[in-house]
Image: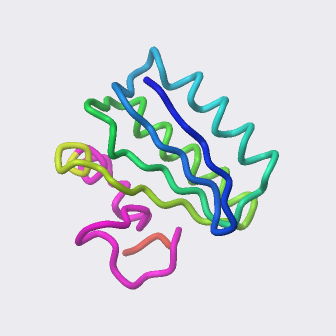
């Protein structure tokens, strides 16, 4: 699993690629959290466009970054997720967090708001 982090005026973007599993998730969490704590962005965008596989570790990665961004008063966005990964996110109930930003789940609720 590889990641690239870009700090831009509109927020921090992290491009993920490869397989997101328990072997790679810890290092990724540490790198992303360090970048968030250093820059305190208003928006953290996790781009899953290059992720071929994700297990429950990916759910933990999303949830943890959602909570971290709430601590800083920011928002989390998950973009570029394949239909397979979107299905995993929906099955875990994370679609209620309104973090998916390129599909039916990205409705008009403010970022980070938990939908009923």
Q: Is residue 110 above or below residue 54?
A: below
Q: Is residue 27 above or below residue 108?
A: above
Q: Which image quarter holds the N terminus?
A: top left
Indicate how the structure is coloured in the image: rainbow
Q: Residue at x 26, y 32 (%)?
A: 52
Q: Residue 44, how many percent across, how many down?
A: 59, 57
Q: Which image quarter holds the C terminus?
A: bottom left
Indicate yes or no whether the magenta region holds residue 98.
yes
Q: Residue 70, how many percent across, how many down?
A: 66, 61
Q: Nearer the viewer, residue 84 or 9?
A: 9
Q: Which residues are magenta?
A: 88-112
Q: Residue 99, how many percent across, how many down?
A: 43, 62
Q: Residue at x 63, y 39 (%)?
A: 32
Instruction: Point out the residue furthest to the bottom here.
Output: 108
Q: Residue at x 36, y 31 (%)?
A: 56
Q: Residue 105, how many percent across, how many down?
A: 29, 69
Q: Nearer the viewer, residue 108 or 35?
A: 35
Q: Is residue 27 above or below residue 107?
A: above
Q: Residue at x 51, y 73 (%)?
A: 111
Left or right for 39, reference 54: right
Indicate yes or no whether the magenta region holds residue 35.
no
């Amino acid at each position: 699993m590889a990641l690239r982090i870009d700090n831009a005026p509109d927020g921090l973007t992290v491009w993920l690629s490869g397989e997101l599993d328990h072997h790679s998730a810890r290092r990724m969490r540490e790198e992303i959290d360090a970048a968030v704590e250093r820059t305190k962005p208003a928006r953290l965008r996790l781009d899953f466009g290059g992720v071929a596989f994700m297990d429950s570790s990916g759910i933990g990665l999303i949830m943890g970054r959602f909570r971290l961004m709430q601590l800083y008063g920011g928002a989390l966005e998950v973009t570029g997720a394949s239909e397979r990964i979107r299905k995993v996110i929906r099955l875990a109930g994370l679609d209620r967090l309104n973090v998916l930003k390129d599909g039916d789940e990205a409705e008009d609720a403010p970022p980070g708001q938990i939908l009923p």
